[in-house]
Amino acid sequence: MVERICPHCGKSGHVRRSHRDCTAHIERSVVINQPTCSSCGQSGHRRSNHHSCPMNPARHTNAVGDVDMNDVDMNDVDMNDVDMIDVDMRDTDVIFEDGVEVENIMMQFEHDDQQLPNVNRCAACNSPTHRRRTSRLCPFYTRAESDTFEGIAQDPTRMPNIRDDRGRMDVICFYCDARMWIGERVVRSSTTNPLFQLCCCKEFSVLENLKPTPPLLTELLTSNDNASKEFRTNIRAYNSSLSFSSMGVKLDKELANQRSGSYTFRIQGSPYHQIGPALPTSGEPPKFSQIYIYDSERELQNRNSIFSELNRDTLRNLQQLMHEVNPFVDHYKTMVQLAEEQNTLDNSSSIGIERMSEVKMVFRAEGTPDKRRYNRPTTSSEIGAIIIGGDGSSGSRTTTSRHIVVHLRHNGSLSRINELNQFYDPLHYVLLYPEGSASWNINSKSISTPENEGSRVSAMDYYSFHLMVRPNNGNLLHLFGKLFHQYIVDIDV
């Protein structure tokens, strides 16, 4: 075997100078040309603005002109030329002119020499805590301003002193027509053809839009008359007076009662919705859904007795709207009427009401098989079933834990509504869902394209889709103010 010998160093084992064992390569590589500064003549840097260069002006704050005061002999200073000296003191804005005693100047320079050693300082703010303007400690650092607010929610004393302006929301999603900011696009998409994950998951979670807001609510939300302003101020109370279910939540009263600043709805723990029987307990006033079984005038009187601060005319108009468009009102009335017919008693007889046979109504947890149908239910079978007698445990009447079961009488106790039921939101937020439109359930599916049609949609994707702003869809969800704020917290928690 022929031994390999390097022609550069004469050693065996390699033939090239670039080999790591070649002495010619090692000797060549250790020769490093040290940079030399043209200003101070020292090695290790090339420019006078380097932090190690003694000629760097950022290192010297006790300067007279461009001269380092450490190199100045005051005995050589001609006092006839004192008026030409511009001394910039660090702690004062005084400009020394004619008549200044040399002794005072020398004392000030001696004081500066003791207090201001040569340290590395920032050229932008002259602070010794950092060297560059890009440091987070520099007040002139402006890049990625949002990063400086990290943890701001954990410390209420830290408030941003600048306005967060993201520009105009003028980009329309190609697939779902949602208005977006260009900064919300998927990173890999272009600005000319942006794709958005937040609104419709890049067309994979496209749903039917919410039903248009009725004209009465539109007028109350957009007008500036006294009745409309009062409605927007007490919008949460109006919704509670008309809702079918109650909301259990531990509200942070200290923050909610603050009069200054914007309205804040903050809770502790998880909220939950409850629903009671269709008839009130003997001797107790009706509440929530129980109010709907009476005639219109008594119904209004019962609501006003609970919410006396609300405008009676506005409450009457909203009550009439519920009777016209909300299907749950008809179902509650039908439930009581069927019970009366079973007992062949008059509706006005309180004794007859007490003797009614057991009747219950079941609201289905999932929607109809038609995945495109998210509008107002048109038949009782789309909502559920009214069961007269029996336990509803046979055949198609079998109930699950996700179903909502409303009893005619149930000892006055409340039942908790399962969050997976499609009527969890419409039964409480009657102003947001005046027509009883079903919300999310485990069978909610996309209707985007033939390829994605039928794919299930998660709760997060469902609410993300409907919370987006879409022009010309007729729904004014974002104008409900305090009620919209409560709705956001409820669905998020």
Image (tube, rainbow, N blue to C red):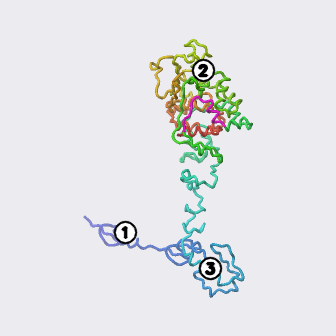
Classify mark 1: helix, strand or loop.
Answer: loop
Which residue occupies the extreme bottom position in the image? 75
Q: At which x and y percent is residue 389?
A: 49, 16
Which of labels 1 and 2 is toward the front? 2
Which residue occupies the extreme top position in the image? 344
Q: Is residue 36 above or below residue 80?
A: above
State which tag comes first along the sequence, 1 or 3: 1
Magenta stretch bounds: 234-249
Q: At which x and y percent is residue 455?
A: 50, 33
Q: Nearer the viewer, residue 179 or 425?
A: 425
Classify mark 2: helix, strand or loop.
Answer: helix
Disc 1 target residue? 17
Disc 2 target residue? 333
The answer to which quarter of the image holds residue 309 is: top right
Q: Is residue 355 above or below residue 283?
A: above
Q: Is residue 368 visible?
A: no
Q: At which x and y percent is residue 449?
A: 54, 33
Residue placed at 46% from the left, 22% from the top?
398
State which tag comes first along the sequence, 3 or 2: 3
Disc 3 target residue? 108
Tag 1 and tag 2, C-beta contact below 8 Å:
no
As for residue 237 lying within the magenta part, the answer is: yes
Residue placed at 46% from the left, 19% from the top?
391
Spatial CA distance of label 1 from label 3 is 63 Å
Amino acid type of the residue tagged 2 in the rendering: Lys
